Image (cartoon, rainbow, N blue to C red):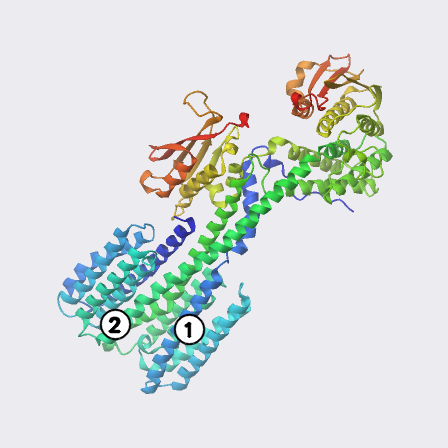
Amino acid sequence: MDLITKERDRLLQRTARVYGLSFTLVALLCIVLPGAVGGTALVISLPLFLVLGVAQFRIGISRSPVWLALALVMGLAIIVVACTVGPRPSQAGFTAVVELAAASLASLGLVLTSNGPRIAALIITFLVVGATLLLLTSDLQAPLRTAGVYVLGWVLPTLIAIWISAGVPQVAKRIASIGRAHRAERQASELEAQRRQGARLLHDTVLATLTLLAHSGVGVTPEALREQAGDDAKLLRQLRLGTTPTPNGDAVGTATSPIQVIDEPVLGTTLESVKQRFGRMGLQVSWHGTGQVLLPSNHLDAFLLALAECLENVRRHSGVTEAHVTITEDSKMVRAMVTDAGVGFDISDIDEAKLGFTESVVARLRDVGGNARLFSAPGSGTTVVLEVPRGDASNGEAGA
Amino acid sequence: MTFSAPEENTLGVVVGNARRAVGKTARRLGRASAHRASLGTAFLGLGAAILVGLRAVYGASWFIGLWGRGVYPQPLAALSAWIVLGAVIVGAIVTSRVIGDRLPDWMFGLFLTGLLVAVALDVIAVWELHDIGRDATAALAAGMTLLIVVTVRGSSEILIAAGVLGVGLAVVIFLDTPPSDQITGDWIAPQITAVAAAVLPAVIGVAIVEGFRRMVQVELDRVLVQSTVSAPRYAVGMLASEELARLDLAAEELLESIAGKKTALPLAPKMASIAASLATELRLHLIEGRRETWLYHAVSESEMLGKAVTLVDKSSLAGLLDPIQRDGLLAAAWLLVGDTITSNASRTVTVQVGPVAPGETPVPEHKILVPITITTTGVARNRVDPSIWDALGRVGHYSDHTQDSSLRVDIECLVDNPADL
């Protein structure tokens, strides 16, 4: 069954509970008035009222027809007892009986409209209770008037149930359209997040600058830092406006840099931008080896990120202002060896202390089938070897 | 461009502090859906207006009957009571239809004043008869008139108004008792039914509208969460891109203010620490591992599931389920949690996905078996909705037991082996 149908039934059940219990209480108040019904009838009715109340309370929770039947039987029993046991009921007793038949039991109409069998049960209940009421009270009030009140009392809750049931599909339709909109929104948000997360190279330079700033920009000339900050802000602005820019050493025309349109960008130019960036921050990077290497853009990304990360580590931790990068290539791999003559460190520390290295360098390279190796000892500098597959047509994706 | 610090930290989201993520997401979605909870109540309001109209016609016909028989000691008071009540009803129906949303306070005040005047005039008209329960007409119809505004004002306000009216009528009836020899059960009964007729319609109306709003809320919550069923294996969730965009913007503004020399270098310690936290947050947002499965997002984004469901999915295996299995699992969780009519907080559901134990049961090629265990507290085996078994059947082969007098379901869920894709 539809979940909203279930919710609707639950709503109707709870309404029936409030409706039924309220009028049962009114009937109870009337029947205990002095002289309303005979003493014996009152004594018999009170426990029946209790059971009726329990049944009507359970109708609010349970869909089981048992409680409906129990409420009906109890209600009928009270009517019969009040009218037949002992002296004839007074006007007050008659009021109690009418409240019971035309309002309290009529609350069953709220939960008896949802399907065929229930509607049939509703009609039968309506006829049985009505016939009992009219037969037993014909001498207390003109039957036509009683019948009028009775019919009105049953039509009201039934109409409420029908009205609510009619409102539910409309609401369900509108909720479903909200759901569709939400799904589209979710997909769009996912794509946008992917686009921003995908702009790795950009975020890398931004993060490097932010990290510098976090140290109050100490160790870098304010002019260089300002220039770098301006470049990065420009890139972020482009990202915000919808393109995926790639950082470039060039301060001008970054959005139109040829690096974005060439399938296999030239490593040389891009390496130059890395060198310039670190130069501004006070680390001289010397270049050795191959000048021009072609790499697919995702391999290039990973390679440059790893390289930048290594240089950043050198800049921050080595205590020297110069690093050497040697690029070599063979038919399968492009390698970069980053060396410095700094303080170095104990390799065994790296697992716990430098998780950043594994996360940012090794993981990125492994993503594209590459690898990184680290050599260092305290006092004797550090060497990192980075390698990525060439990824050209012959062996490109095999390495991945 | 000047830089302002981001107004909230998003770190908690990442390090597994799901509760905070849940709270924040639910709050945001909740804010959006609080307004939407009024969905469909306009239709209910129309029904209520029709009922009030019918009730007024019924009461007015009684009034005309009494008038014709010359019962009224103060006929003009009774007539003006009906004129005032009629004006209030027509005015309230038109206004609430036109406004459609919440009725302004002063209008509600005017409405209540109108009702008060109508009740007072009607009581004055029949005072000397000493039988308000039988002779009052407009005063009783006034109680039901509250239904007109039941969808455009708070439930408690309506209940208080109805309560005041009921108590007021009871007091007036008490003050207006006839000589004591006439006070019999037959005199009291109409007074009781009169007060009930004035108060109960509003009470029942409030119950219906409250239930209806709850139904809409639950269904909205469910439909919004349902969209996770079609999400990819890992997703960043609805708010991640918003957060990332916010961080990017904050970084951009900071960098720009530095480039534009609006911020002095070297940075003041406060600005430096802002830059540090921005960098940390940004870094965490960019890590791929931040991505979670659809089930995590479903649980954290839903107000109902978030409160009761604990998810244990260390290897993020839930992402492997296909849409039909996801739909079944979500529906089952929903039925277990949402079946509480009495909102007892003791009902909790824990969904554990995995770990995969290879080789125990033969599985078809290119498939792996992900065991899913649903343990509950406070859910009796015989009390769960029967349609839950159908939902569980869509997830996989299941077996149900009772553990600590609560339901426990073990599901063997066959999914495509990600290694073969």
Q: Residues within 10 Å of mark 1 (few under 14, many from 20)?
A: many
Is residue A32 at all visible to an observer of this figure? no
Residue found 36% across the figure and 81% down from its top:
B63
Which residue has dot 1 on it? Answer: B53
Q: Is residue A285 left or right of residue B329?
A: right
Q: Secondary structure at mark 2?
A: helix
Horizontal relation, residue B37 to residue A229: left or right = left
- Is there any visible trace of residue A279 in the rendered image? yes
Give the chain of mark 1. Answer: B
What is the three-letter code of the residue carrying label 2? Answer: Ala
Find the residue positioned furthest to the left.
A86
Q: Residue at x 76, y 43 (%)?
A: A237
B29 or A373, nearer to the observer:
A373
Quarter holding residue A290:
top right
- Vertical placement of residue A185 versus A278, above or below: below
Viewer-proximal residue among A9 and A85: A9
Q: Are marks 1 and 2 in contact (CB under 8 Å)?
A: no
Q: CA distance from mark 1 to mark 2?
A: 22 Å
Q: Nearer the viewer, residue A1 or B367?
A: B367
- Establish whether labels 1 and 2 are both on one chain: no
Of A392 and A173, nearer the camera is A392
Q: Which mark is residue A147?
A: 2
Where residue B157 appears, x then y in whole percent?
Answer: 47, 63
What is the quadrant of residue A249 in the picture?
top right
Dividing the image into 4 quarters, which one contains the C terminus of chain A?
Answer: top right
| In the rendered image, the vertical position of residue B47 relative to residue B74, given as above or below | above
